[in-house]
Amino acid sequence: MNDYNTLALLVDELWLKGKNRGDYFRAMKENIEKALKAWHKKRVNVKIESQRFLLRSETPFTEETLLGLKRLGGIFQVIPVREIPLDYDQLMDPILKELDAREDQNFTFKVETLRSFKKYPKNSMEINRHIGHLILEARPNLKVDVKNPDVMVKIRVLPEHFYVSTKTLMAPGGLPVGTNGHLVTMLSGGFDSPVASYLMSKRGCKQTFVFYYSYPFVGEEVKEKIEKLASVLGTYQAGSKLWIVPFGKLQKKIAKTCKENYRTILFRKFMVECTNKLAKRINADALLTGDSLGQVSSQTIGNISLIDEVSLMPIMRPLIGFNKKETIKLAKEIGTHDISVIPHDDACSMFAPKHPVIKPKNDYWHEYSKENDFSDELNNALDDAEVFDISVNGLLTSCQNH
């Protein structure tokens, strides 16, 4: 795909936005331009044409640019196209060039024409039949399959030119990031929270990531793993940040002062309290976690209910009904799986009770909360946090002012 100077980006739900459609298209264009600035260093003209984005570059788009664009929420498909003058006799050469570029030359195909320019003298069916016939004449080893072709030869007829394409890259769809609020995502080293982040990025949510770093009970490799995960997740949105909050001392303090079987849920309580404080600092709208109902002890209905009482902001849980296999499948698709499987120390596991509470008693929960106010410690932890800016091409740079 290294010789395409034109891309067509098809949108998804932006069609449904009625009078607000213009705002969504402007946000989508801004995200596209940010991605191009990061991935494609040459000048690109971005234009809205027939309710989709047309990108024309002075130089061919790279594989990296195509992959960067296909991660953007709101984009449904990225289609490399050949732009041809509106001269029917010029159609076949670029079509054969597309087909001949395939390694396997024994494939089936179908021609599909969309005639946006209704005044064009040939209708869609006439073009389909004639071009299909010419392809079979030129490449007799190929076969037509109208139901399940290996290659779809797409022709779009516009007032000034044809677009020809044979390749389509699927993108997340949904809404452009920045159109649906700001979340603080509680990131861990497992599969769940990165997948939850991806699901909400394609719902248009800007995200700030927070990781509670249990130093000195875990090593530097844990932090490095989180930075790698944040780097991948940052490519699905422009302008995210990562906060690495020191939590080890407070975690030890909680473990010493609470009943052993309440340790895990109380760790969670104070992480959520701290995340609320962070959300208030950066004017975020809600929290995001990778909770899946019943997956671990802290994610039973009883424990989730208590955590919801603690939070002053809504907590989004897009994986609440997911099975682990479903989450792992998505992790592989979005590029976080191979990072999540890297083994690392986990302070929560080190302090974990043998029998964590599943149905917590409200009396003890509220009594402990009343007697142990760690607000100062949480604020100090945020003040001491390491903060990184994440570019849309996944580069982390230290942010001094936060």
Image (spheres, grey):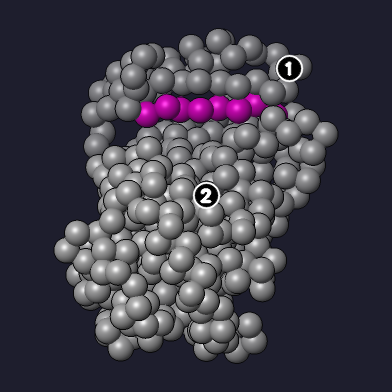
Asked if residue 310 is positioned above or below residue 270 in the image, the reply reads above
- Residue sitting at x 30%, y 44%: 294
In this orientation, does residue 109 appear?
A: yes
Residue 227 x/y as whole percent: 40, 74
Name the image quarter holding residue 63. bottom left
Q: Is 161 on the left or on the right of 61, as rendered?
A: right
Q: What element carries label 1?
A: loop
Per the rendered image, the range of residues in magenta is: 151-158
Name the image quarter holding residue 399. bottom right
Asked if residue 200 is positioned above or below residue 37 in the image, the reply reads above
Amino acid type at image mark 1: Lys
- Residue sitting at x 43%, y 57%: 363
Asked if residue 48 is positioned above or below residue 135 in the image, the reply reads below
Q: How would you rate the neighbour count of disc 2 (Cα within 10 Å): few for under 14, some for 14-19, many for 20 or more?
A: some
In this orientation, does residue 63 appear?
A: no
For marks 2 and 1, give the one nearer the viewer.
Answer: 2
* Residues at discs 2 and 1 in contact (Cβ within 8 Å): no
Residue 150 or residue 398, whichever sits in front: 398
Q: How would you rate the neighbour count of disc 1 (Cα within 10 Å): few for under 14, some for 14-19, many for 20 or more?
A: few
- Residue sitting at x 34%, y 59%: 336
Residue 129 or residue 337, whichever sits in front: 337
Residue 384 or residue 103, whichever sits in front: 384
Magenta-span inclusion, residue 155 = yes
Residue 367 x/y as whole percent: 46, 66
> Which disc, if any, is residue 316?
2
Q: Mark 1 points at which residue?
A: 118
Magenta-span inclusion, residue 338 = no
